[in-house]
Amino acid sequence: MVSVTSSKPPAPAKRSFREQMHLAREDAIITVVNRLLAEKGFEAMTLDEVAIEVGVAKASLYKHFSSKEDLASAAMVRMMDRARAFLDKLQSDAADRRPVDQLKAVARWTIEVQLAGEMPSLPSQNSSLRAVLTNNKAYVDGLMDISDRLGAWIIAAQADGSLNRALPPIAVLYTLYARGCDPVLGFLKGTGLYEDEQITEMVLSTCFEGLQSR
Amino acid sequence: MVSVTSSKPPAPAKRSFREQMHLAREDAIITVVNRLLAEKGFEAMTLDEVAIEVGVAKASLYKHFSSKEDLASAAMVRMMDRARAFLDKLQSDAADRRPVDQLKAVARWTIEVQLAGEMPSLPSQNSSLRAVLTNNKAYVDGLMDISDRLGAWIIAAQADGSLNRALPPIAVLYTLYARGCDPVLGFLKGTGLYEDEQITEMVLSTCFEGLQSR
DNA sequence: GTCTATAAATGGATAGAC
DNA sequence: GTCTATCCATTTATAGAC
């Protein structure tokens, strides 16, 4: 409370509060959707599940999102925003690092997010979600922004000789993206033999150093 | 026709013919299922689609397979058998090659099958298919056989110094398995910039040599 | 905006004639 | 063993009261 003398808060503040509640609810929904997408993928996720886990009626979901695809898109966009925020942090905190180390940091972040069960799996091939996503400006713009920033590091790393110059930058970019849905993480986790940190190091090693000895 | 004097073929031959027809029909079904599994995954594949593409009534599918999971399992087992046949061929045709080159040949085969749109995507995380597969003896036995044979090569390749000794063999094995569902193939194919052969070489390079220069 | 109730559509599986 | 027709459960989406 800012003022105790006023029995009625000013209108703008009140609307802002309601809006905050609205956004908080939406955020809770997206968090649940995000986890379910990571766990079982778009097709296997049902809105009944979402509604139950969030603790609202299924019909209420439609007051926030117009369809299942729209719901999933919101989760994908939020993850993209998280990634962009991480890139911001990388660029401001460690701007002096070698480009190849920046790329490694990105791969590490991606792997850690996936190990935490928070990486929504991208829609397989010809999903209905895919069509919606490619028409979602926030998603497409975010993806392009990330690609541009990673692309600059890739070019720089190839120029300074730390990254294999024989690979087209786009191949490097996609290889890094693929770390976000690498089934090896789940396989290794399933053995119960390794800690998350060990798994991260192994996958990072195979990604940047390859399987052959050096 | 073997004989024109007999108006009625011998019973065993007739039954064998029917059996062949039966197997041929089943094979056609499995081929369609295999492609659909590769295209859209288990959840998104519907039995209506399968029936239409095969050209039979949906109910007829149940004369051959008792459930959707059973149907998909048959496709997975057949792919496993194809893989084992390839391993047989590798071991007899090129038994003198270095273990690491045998592993590369396996990875190349896996990539080529996937590029041909014939690699059924493994069930994501907690699918109903996964439970059925882990109880399918043919599948589990086949997977163990493949793992054993690849495992021997991995150990040998680490012993002769061609494969990174710091990686647990199981991590190498899973990394090779993951080439069978590598989204990088689809990404690169989607650009339209590269032939399948080029994509194969790039992915093989990143897998065995890594992203960093050598 | 949240709820209960229900519509509308889909998809896995079965019945029964041939 | 194949077909048509149907059942039944699930799931996306909406109507309408509060």
Image: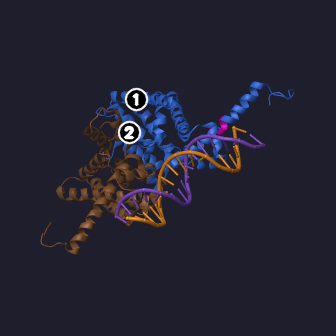
Chain colours: A blue, B brown, C orange, D purple
* Distance between the alpha carbons at the discs numbered 1 and 2: 12 Å
Which x, y percent locates residue D5?
47, 57
For the C terminus of chain B, the image quarter is: top left
Label 1 or label 2, whichever comes before in sequence order: 1
Q: Which residue is mark 2?
A: A175
Residue A19 - label: none
Farthest residue, direction bottom: B11
- Which amino acid type is shown beneath numbered disc 1? Gly
The secondary structure type at the circle numbered 1 is helix
Kindly indicate the quadrant of the structure image that contains residue B203: top left
The residue sitting at 36% across, 32% down in the picture is A170
The span picked out in magenta is: A23-27
Reply yes or no: does residue A14 show up in magenta.
Answer: no
Chain containing the residue with disc 1: A
Residue B191 appears left or right of A129 = left
Residue A151 - label: 1
Closer-to-camera residue (B137/B213): B137
The residue sitting at 44% across, 53% down in the picture is A188
Residue B103 appears left or right of B49 = left
- Which amino acid type is shown beneath numbered disc 2? Thr
For the N terminus of chain B, the image quarter is: bottom left
Which x, y percent locates residue A15?
73, 28
Which x, y percent locates residue A52?
63, 50
Residue B166 at least partly seen: no
Labels 1 and 2 share a subunit = yes
Residue B163 appears left or right of A78 = left
Chain containing the residue with disc 2: A
CA neighbours of label 1 inside 10 A, class few (<14), some (14 to 19), many (20+): some
The secondary structure type at the circle numbered 2 is helix
Residue B202 at least partly seen: yes
Closer-to-camera residue (A36/A59): A59
